[in-house]
Amino acid sequence: QAAIEQLRSQLAASDEKLKEAVQKSEEAQAKSESQEQDKAADRDRAKKRMQELEAEVAELREELEGVADELAAARKSVKEAQRAQHEAEAAAQQAQHAQHGMVS
């Protein structure tokens, strides 16, 4: 009889340990799943931010191309203005030489 009680006691203790192990396992699995969800959410956020940054970069690239076009046009205008100024100066010198030639 005592041996049966001892076996029942051991069985009850083993059963309790098994229940605790199952509970710990379930908690660990839930924590793992939660971490996976957090990682997935982090990946989604990172992907979204990357897309936002790519859109910003594309926008800035377009702006930069526009500025480069404006700069090229401005440089061309400056060169044309310089050429016109040189032509005007040359014409003025010719006129001055012609005037001196007439005076002499």
Image (cartoon, helix red, strand yellow):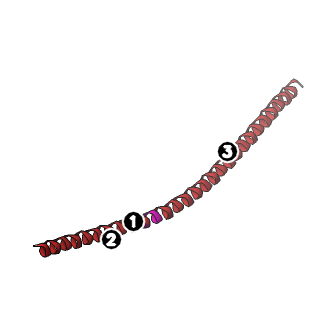
Q: Give how far across and how far down residue 95 sits, in percent.
A: 20, 73
Residue on which disc 1 sits? 74
> Which of the labelled discs sits on residue 2, or is there none?
none
Circles 1 and 3, Cβ within 8 Å, touching? The answer is no
Judged by depth in the image, the label closer to the viewer, 1 or 3, is 1
Total marks shown come to: 3
Q: 92 or 44: which is nearer to us?
A: 92
C-alpha gap between disc 1 and disc 3: 57 Å
Magenta segment, which residues?
Answer: 65-69
The dot on residue 35 is 3
Q: Is residue 83 left or right of residue 13?
A: left
Which of the marked residues, 1 or 3, is nearer the chain's N terminus?
Answer: 3
Where 99 sits versus 60, above or below? Answer: below
Q: Which amino acid does label 3 sit on?
A: Gln
Q: Residue furthest right?
A: 1
Secondary structure mostly seen in the magenta stretch: helix
Circle 3 sits in a helix, a strand or a loop, which is it? Answer: helix
Q: Is 66 in the magenta?
A: yes
Left or right of 63 in this view: 30: right
52, 89: nearer the viewer: 89
Which three-letter amino acid code belongs to the residue tagged 2? Glu
Disc 2 versus disc 1: distance between alpha carbons?
A: 10 Å
Secondary structure, mark 2, is: helix
